[in-house]
Each structure stands twice: as structure tokens, then as C-alpha cells.
Amino acid sequence: MKKFFSFLSGAIMGGLVGAVLAILLAPSSGEELRGELKDRFGGFTEEINQAMKDKRVELESKLEELRKPVEKAK
């Protein structure tokens, strides 16, 4: 378990360092970069919300099926 948390913390730190370096070394201006990030993040959140809605509908229909009374066979 300790190895897993060490790996996880290392992966998170590596991701943060990589993100900072990417922003600092990006060829576009800060304003352009912020606009691009905002657009990408907006699209990403829209996709997540849509997936959540789809999964909710699917789970509600399965729950409705499970709540139906079972007819006994004669």
C-alpha cells in the first residue's frame, strides 16, 4: 500500500511539473493559452455532464426493472 501511495504522489507531482513547464514553454501568449484552456475545459465538462446524464437514465431504468414485482411461476 505504501508503494502505491508513493507512486501516486510521484505521478501527481510529475504531472504538475509537466503542466507548469508546458505553460511556461508554450509558444502562444498567456491570453491565447488561457482561452484555449478554457475552451478545452468547457468541452470536457460538457462531455462529463452528458455522460453523467446518460448513465443516470440507464441506472434509473435498471432500478425501475428491479423494483417491479416478480410473478411466481405456476
Image: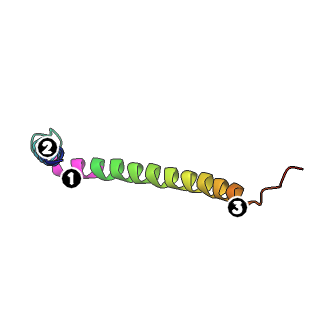
Position of residue 74 relative to residue 68, above or below, is: above
Q: Which residue is identified by label 1?
A: 31
Nearer the observer, disc 2 or disc 1?
2
User: For the image shown, how many numbered marks are present on the structure?
Assistant: 3
The spot of residue 29 in percent (x, y) is: 16, 46
The span from disc 2 to disc 1 (Cα, nearest Å) is: 40 Å
Q: Are marks 1 and 3 in contact (CB under 8 Å)?
A: no
Horizontal arrangement in the rendering, residue 47 relative to residue 73 (left or right) = left
Horizontal arrangement in the rendering, residue 15 relative to residue 65 (left or right) = left
Q: Is the residue marked by circle 3 packed among few (<14), some (14-19), or many (20+) residues within 10 Å?
A: few
The spot of residue 55 in percent (x, y) is: 55, 51
Q: Earlier in the sequence, mark 1 or mark 3?
A: 1
Q: Which residue is identified by label 2?
A: 3
Q: Secondary structure at mark 2?
A: helix
Q: Is the residue marked by circle 2 packed among few (<14), some (14-19), or many (20+) residues within 10 Å?
A: few
- Which residue corresponds to the image point at 34% horizontal and 51% vertical from the top-left? 41
Q: Mark 2: which amino acid?
A: Lys
- Which residue corresponds to the image point at 21% horizontal and 52% vertical from the top-left? 31
- Residue bounds of the magenta highlight: 29-35
Look at the image and say whether residue 32 sits in the magenta stretch. yes
Q: Mark 1: which amino acid?
A: Glu
Look at the image and say whether residue 26 sits in the magenta stretch. no
Q: Which residue is identified by label 3?
A: 67
Q: Mark 3: which amino acid?
A: Arg
Q: Earlier in the sequence, mark 2 or mark 3?
A: 2
Horizontal arrangement in the rendering, residue 21 relative to residue 66 (left or right) = left
Which residue reaches farthest right?
Answer: 74
Q: Secondary structure at mark 1?
A: helix
Horizontal arrangement in the rendering, residue 42 relative to residue 14 (left or right) = right
Q: Secondary structure at mark 3?
A: helix
Q: Earlier in the sequence, mark 2 or mark 1?
A: 2
